[in-house]
Image: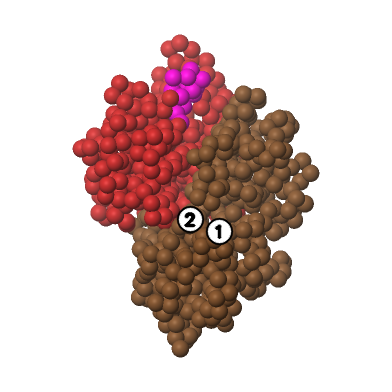
Chain colours: A red, B brown
Amino acid sequence: MKKNLLVAQSGGPTAAINATLAGVIGEAKAHEEIDRVIGACYGIQGVLEEKFIDLTELVDTEEKLEKLRVTPAAALGSCRFKLKDISEDDSQYRQIVEILHKHDIGYFIYIGGNDSMDTVAKLSKYCKDKGIDDIQVVGGPKTIDNDLMGIDHCPGFGSAAKYIAAVFAELEQEMCVYDTKSVIVVEMMGRHAGWLTAAAALADIPNADVPYLIYLEERPFSIERFIEDLKTKLDGSDVVMIAVSEGVHDEEGRFICESVSSAKGLDVFGHAQLSGTGKILENAIRDQIGCKVRSIELNLLQRCASHILSATDIEESGELGANAVRLAVAKQTGLMSSLRRVSNTPYRVAYEGVDIQQVANAEKKVPQEWINEDGNGVTQECIDYLLPLIQGEMSCHFRNGVPDYLILK
Amino acid sequence: MKKNLLVAQSGGPTAAINATLAGVIGEAKAHEEIDRVIGACYGIQGVLEEKFIDLTELVDTEEKLEKLRVTPAAALGSCRFKLKDISEDDSQYRQIVEILHKHDIGYFIYIGGNDSMDTVAKLSKYCKDKGIDDIQVVGGPKTIDNDLMGIDHCPGFGSAAKYIAAVFAELEQEMCVYDTKSVIVVEMMGRHAGWLTAAAALADIPNADVPYLIYLEERPFSIERFIEDLKTKLDGSDVVMIAVSEGVHDEEGRFICESVSSAKGLDVFGHAQLSGTGKILENAIRDQIGCKVRSIELNLLQRCASHILSATDIEESGELGANAVRLAVAKQTGLMSSLRRVSNTPYRVAYEGVDIQQVANAEKKVPQEWINEDGNGVTQECIDYLLPLIQGEMSCHFRNGVPDYLILK
């Protein structure tokens, strides 16, 4: 008996989350168990509010599917909405199951990051506990932070890493233009993992004569030590490039940026909303060294830069969406679609499903052994891990000189 | 008799200034009057210090020339160095002429913005006044600010404008992801002209349902009026995109950003170094409206984004370099290589030379009639002017997933 497939997106947008959506839509057509593909707008919140659109109808040509693949941010919309604890109140779960039954939905693919995988974990467990076996819930991974467990690397990360490497390469050219001592500090996103910041090291490869200082949040940060590091580098070079995670903190865990102390600076999951680390370092350099210095916060630009995508990332993101459909149809509920790195040279991956319980609410940090002894750079092993993920260039479509996206909602 | 050609770059880098350099190098080969192409590193300062490199040797293949075309920033290095007033002290001019004679240089192409055209004007006037007729000095225009007189639009501007339009298109997708009222403020460079900010309007075309508010420095700015504008737009839309020039100021000419009052915030030309306008508006929105708001300062990223270039800009930038060589060889000293828009539909330009005196130390602002009555957007005429300049996509070369540039110095 044919059932409909529901797909939704959640968490922070990425440049590749729609590639996963396109993978889901494309693969669904190949399965006779699936009738229509329905999209929920604004994540699980949209499911509860039955904000549904018919994706089989809206994305009915290869051309639209192709355009969707390279459209940034979440075409279905997203939410930051945490389901209640089942043991305290299971009404939301009952409601979701009712809605899914009402719309004849047998498969639910939820694409998102850590918090979204928590939703998949809770909902699939609820269904199992209640003996509801006609709804398969599968997670589709995504996060530019690259901090999901149970997967070699996260879709969306490769494109963000490629953007960051490109930006550093460009800024390095900028900085070398004047014949004076100058320093640039670039602040990357990443609350509790330094993967994006580590990607700056990829730009360091082609022009090895300009030194980089790279500070990940995985190592305690000290402004005094940082200034010493920089002074040493400035002894040997006019230009120094600095990459820093927004979440760097001292030995006691206090963030270098100040805003964390404000109660207003918390999102709905209780995460601190950080900003300003780069600015603080810029000011410290100006005060304590006095050379020319600028800081740049990459901000949202690093997660939506559809004009420079990693072809590897877009391909894998799509394949992870397709794999999620295959898992759901095979009644593998409670899994996250995942990939394993089978080999690094040549780079090859295999697609699989992993138990969502090992993914939800955990964070994968940059391993300590991939950070150099001084805590101001990454090792070759880290670069070897990162480099395959940014191979190949893709971009969004353009019309009349400006990006042309597929708009769904 | 063959003479050498000297070329140098000056002022703020752009993503297209090396396309002009490539145009100079490529065209020089076609002229038997020219022996070798010599590059001065770090602008006119490098000329005074005889920091010369042999470009005929360093850029000896079509492949290298092609790579140079799409390498961002100034491959020869740049300076911000103002020659002394001739009437007070002409020693620098004498020294430059001596150095040029010593190196058998008959042609000097200086690529730069307003201040660099001032250098061309002074040096060519000095040569004329002294009856030195074996040195032809020609200016090659460039500035992302698009504020040079005597030219329809400036090389480098088209690529920066395309980058800005792409960024706005991407951020618009980002902002529409959540089902909540949210505002983004993006601050563009441009000390005394709002051209770059106007380019945000190009992203407004494809998705006309998200309102844009665009504030150029050409109109006095009032935070009170701005908040009223925004409230009105938020009545009709969840998302509002705001573009603002760093240099917006009130009726009395006081910059909205605060840093201008500091004496330290002046560059060697006495220009105020501005920053923080976007942040100030972000805070005003948070305080006075209270909706979700973020600000982004595009900073250096807008002038070195070689991963998204306007093909039109790169082609024209090269042709302006070639045209500068043709002017120099024709002994048209004291001119700036320029282009005129012959027609808009279809878009066609013609290359010419303009008297440097009409260019130096003047600024071309966005015409008042191209700004809407409310002072918060641009007219169709402005868009018609801008749109041809961002047509066609090009990017730097990539190797192993990261940008691969031609490094000269």
For marks 2 and 1, the one nearer the N-term is 2
In the rendered structure, the answer to whether residue B218 lies left or right of residue B3 reads right
Residue beneath disc 1: B115
Q: Quadrant of residue B139?
A: bottom right
The image shows residue A361 at horizontal and vertical percentages of 37, 25
Provide the major secondary structure of the magenta segment: loop
Amino acid carrying mark 1 in the image? Asp
Q: Seen in the image, is A293 located left or right of residue B374?
A: left
Residue placed at 46% from the left, 39% from the top?
Answer: A297
Q: Disc 2 marks which residue?
A: B80
Check disc 2 and give the amino acid type: Arg
Q: Chain of mark 2?
A: B
Residues at badges 2 and 1 in contact (C-beta under 8 Å)?
yes
Q: Position of residue B47 (x, y in %)?
A: 42, 66
Which of the 4 quarters of the picture holds residue B95? bottom left
Does residue A335 belong to the magenta stretch?
no
Label 2: few (<14), some (14–19) or many (≥20) C-alpha neighbours in 10 Å:
some
Q: Which residues are magenta?
A: A259-275
SS for tag 2? loop
